[in-house]
Amino acid sequence: MAIQKVGVVGCGLMGSGIAQVCAAAGFPTVVREVSAELVDKGRKGIEKNLNRLAEKGTITEAVKEEIRGRLKGTTSLEDVRNSDLIIEAIIEQLPAKRELFSALDKICPPSTIFASNTSSLTITEMATATKRPQRFVGLHFFNPVPVMKLVEVVRTIATDEAVYEEIVAFGAKLGKTAVRAKDSTGFIVNRLLVPYLLDAIRALEEGAGSIEDIDNSMRLGCGHPMGPLTLLDFVGLDTTYYISQIMFDEFKEKRFAAPPLLKRMVLAGWNGRKSGRGFYDYADPQKPRALKF
Ligand code: CAA
C-alpha cells in the first residue's frame, strides 16, 4: 500500500521543515504539537519559508496555497492516527519518544508505519516500545530540511524489507536523495560529521588557528558551505554535546569524546546561534563576530 497521508509529531525546527516538504511533495500532512502556541509558531515558520519561495518565484502563489491547504496543525494525537506514515520529530529523549510511540501504537491501525527523525538514539530501542517493530524505521533529515537534499533511511534488524523499500521510495518522492543506513549510532552522516566537528574544537583548544581561520580553512580550502565552528553554532553546541555523549557511550572511542571547551560552553549556556552566542557572537545576526578564547 503506497503512502498517501502523512502525520508529523513535533513542529519545532525539524518537524516544521519535515511537514513543509511532505506537503510540498503532495501529501496531505497533519502536524501535531503539544500546545496551540507551538502549533502556531511552527506554522508561522512554514508560512515564512513558503512566502520567501513565492517571492523568489520558485513557486507560484497558486502552488503556495495548495501546499498550505495540504497542511493541518493540531494538538491532538488522535488527529494523526489515520496517517499511513507518522514521522516523529520531538525532543531527543528516549523515554519521551518511547512513550509517544507506545501511545501511537495503541491508537493507530496495524498498517501505519512509524519513523523517527532522531539523529543519534537507537531506532531499535524506540521500535520495542511498540508491537510493530517490523513497521518501524529511522528517517533522518538535515537542517534546514527544505534545503538539504539528503535523508538517511534507517533499518533495524527487525524492519520488514517491503516497508523499508516503501520508505526509501517515499524519501525520493520528497525530492531527497535517500541513503540506506543501518541502525548504527549516528548512522552515516553523524558518524563522520561529529568527529570532524569535535576535532575542529580540539584544533582551536590546541591553538592551531583562530576561529575565523579554522572556518575559512575548511570553507575556502575544501569548499564546505560553512566552516566547522560556524556549523557547530548552527547545529547547536548543546545538541552536538548530547550527540557526542551518546556516540562515545556506544563506541567508547576518543574521536567521539566531547572536548573540555565544548562542555564548558554548554555549561555556560553558549549554545550557538539560537542562544546568541557560541564560537561567534550574534548580537548582530547579519554580522557574527568571532570570539577569542
Ligand atoms: N529554511 C529554508 N530555506 C533556507 C533556510 C532555512 N532555514 N536557510 C537558507 N535557506 C535557503 C535560502 O532561501 C536560499 O535559497 P535560494 O538558493 O533558492 O535563494 C538557499 O537556502 C541558500 O541560502 P543563503 O543564500 O541565505 O545562504 P547560504 O548559501 O549560506 O546557505 C545553508 C545556507 C543552506 C544553511 C548553507 O550554509 C549550508 O548548506 N550549510 C551547511 C548546513 C549543514 O551542514 N546542515 C546539516 C547539519 S547536521 C544535521 O542537521 C543533522 C544532525 O543530526 C546534527
Image: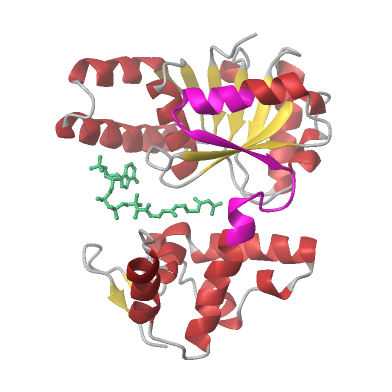
Looking at the image, is 221 positioned above or below residue 234? below
Q: Quadrant of residue 113?
A: top right
> Which one is nearer the viewer's eye here, 110 or 267?
110
| Viewport quadrant of the N terminus | top right
Residue at x-position 40% and y-position 75%: 279
Q: Residue 217: x, y in percent?
A: 37, 75
Residue at x-position 50% and y-position 75%: 200
Q: Residue 133: x, y in percent?
A: 81, 28
Q: Is residue 293 magenta?
A: no
> Which one is nearer the viewer's eye here, 147 or 292?
147
Colour logic: secondary structure
> Which one is nearer the viewer's eye here, 170 or 67?
170
Residue at x-position 44% and y-position 44%: 13
Q: Is residue 175 left or right of residue 219?
A: right
Residue positioned most to the top: 1
Q: How many marks?
A: 0
Q: Residue 272: x, y in percent?
A: 42, 66
Residue 31 visible here: no
Q: Quadrant of residue 199?
A: bottom right
Q: Quadrant of residue 238?
A: bottom right
Q: Is residue 183 magenta?
A: yes
Residue range of the region highlighted in magenta in the rendering: 167-192
| Viewport quadrant of the C terminus | bottom left
Q: Is residue 218 left or right of residue 114?
A: left
Residue at x-position 34% and y-position 38%: 45
Q: Residue 253: x, y in percent?
A: 75, 71
Residue 255 visible here: yes
Q: Is residue 216 left or right of residue 119?
A: left
Residue positioned most to the bottom: 207
